[in-house]
Amino acid sequence: MSDRVYLTTPLYYVNAEPHLGHTYTTVLVDTLARFHRSMGRDVFFLTGTDEHGDKIAEAAAAGGAAPKEYADRVANLFRATWDECEITYDHFIRTTDEHHVAFVRDVLQRVYDAGDIYFGEYGGKYCTGCERFYADRELVNGKCPDHETEPEWISEENYFFRMSKYQDRLMAELDAHPELVRPAGYRNELLGLLREPLEDLCISRPKSRLEWGIELPFDSSYVTYVWFDALLNYLSGLALVKGDEAPEFWSKAQHFIAKDILKPHAVFWPTMLMAAGYPLYDHLNVHGYWNMGESKMSKSLGNVIRPLEMKERFGLDSFRYFLLREMVFGMDSGFTEDAFITRYNADLSNGLGNLVSRVLSMQHKYFDGVIQALPASLEPSERALRDRFFAAEENVKAQTEDLGLHLALEEIWGAIGTCDKYIVETAPFKLWKDESQRTRVGVILHVLCDALGHTARLIRPFMPDTSDRIFELLACEAEQLSNPAPEWGARFAAGHRVDKPEPLFPRIEVEA
Ligand code: MSP
């Protein structure tokens, strides 16, 4: 039986349109999904939209629409955007889906019957932006640290989940499973949160205040708090699609989120799982935030990056490359168009694009595109190039498993750089002038074409379209998905003809 992997993105709120931040998490998970599939694993990749709660009701009202109508529009926009970005999700879940609603009500009823949900009165400071109550110590100058607005005092009768009861178990799980939340910086942040006693979690909203939510199964005058609803998507979506196989996938669940929603995923969610009788997820992977240069990305600052605009202007793979190469998993990054263009020109246009075009042009110039035979044993310089690619293959695998995607790309570009050096050192354009050396030129170019094939395999999860284009140029479509790679030198039989080069990444000229 093959290994299973279950990968999730957060469910994005439908009160904003897809931007750089959402795109990063989604592209990251897509890259990992493609990687795991290439390793022969059985992947389930879930994404979708979070559609209930105050924030969405307010946004709908502001736009003069009914909440469902509004949510339909934005959920479709998210789905269409991911489709245009060629995101290979297996299922797109909406928290307004009927099966999800039924699943949430079922869990609520079970937790209620088990005595872990009780009715009580609560007053607290509530931030509508975050959809949650804040303790004083969490506020900065009395304001929500994320939204920089003063929370509202709300006091009402509500239902509470006995989250406090599970604090010790959560700490024990973290001890037993140190990589549950990673990287370590976020695990430490969580341990910090758990140093204070956990409070119970208010999980209902009276309908008199908010109607847009899932009705509690045991009290029809309340709807469910949006986080208690949305987090359960990770189980409801899995159960819907995988049925009886769900538990096997669940034991391999890897959530991907940014640091903004650490607490709901690292505290609410595992304690909910305990109360509902499920094992915990395997890993919560937390990445940092994209800022716009030094400042926050925000609609009011007019600096929001839209994925489809980036695709239109620079191509999908260049955008994927930048996001994955630039961000160190767990750390914040800054996005600027200058940095994007600099990287594009250096790594894609001059680096990969130039190599592909140089090699294919020489193959055409000297041999009319026809690959020449290799000798029975390779010279040291060819063996060194081959070994560099073999090492890259192993390192890229290890780094990708470890979420060091920027290192994996660095490694691939290291191997690309070795090809450039090999061309300079062997100087096929000089050798060609000496007729006795022409067989050798054929060998050098064969080896370089093989290196391009290996490069196309290595970049495949990160830059799938570019990988396809390189395989097309090499005229070797059929074997492109094969794993492991063909033996070095076995990719092309002598006589195989490659295509003429086309520019993969035309240089972006910047006006001075
Ligand atoms: N609806 C909740 C999540 C519920 S999951 C059961 C939510 N939605 S959100 O639309 O606000 O999305 C937050 C997520 O979007 C972040 O955790 C991250 O994955 C992504 N990002 C949004 N802005 C981001 C940046 N500026 N930088 C990096 N990622 C960001 O929270």
Image: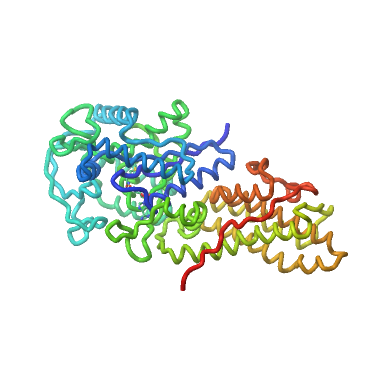
The residue most toward the right is 436
Q: Position of residue 8 (x, y in %)?
A: 42, 42
Q: Is residue 227 above or below residue 434?
A: above
The N terminus: image quadrant: top right
Q: Is residue 319 left or right of residue 289?
A: right
Residue depicted at 55% across the width and 45% down the height: 35
- Viewer-proximal residue among 171 and 463: 463
Q: Position of residue 476 (x, y in %)?
A: 69, 45
Q: Is residue 235 left or right of residue 457?
A: left
Residue depicted at 41% across the width and 64% down the height: 336
- Viewer-proximal residue among 221 and 12: 12
- Viewer-proximal residue among 99 and 78: 78
Residue depicted at 28% across the width and 38% down the height: 228
Colour convention? rainbow
Q: Position of residue 263 (x, y in %)?
A: 31, 48
Q: Position of residue 230 (x, y in %)?
A: 31, 38
User: Is there any visible trace of residue 176 in the rendered image?
Assistant: no
Q: Is residue 475 left or right of residue 28?
A: right
Quadrant in which residue 381 is drawn: bottom right
The residue most toward the bottom is 512
User: Is there any visible trace of residue 220 in the rendered image?
Assistant: yes
Q: Is residue 43 above or below residue 359?
A: above
Q: Is residue 449 above or below residue 115?
A: below
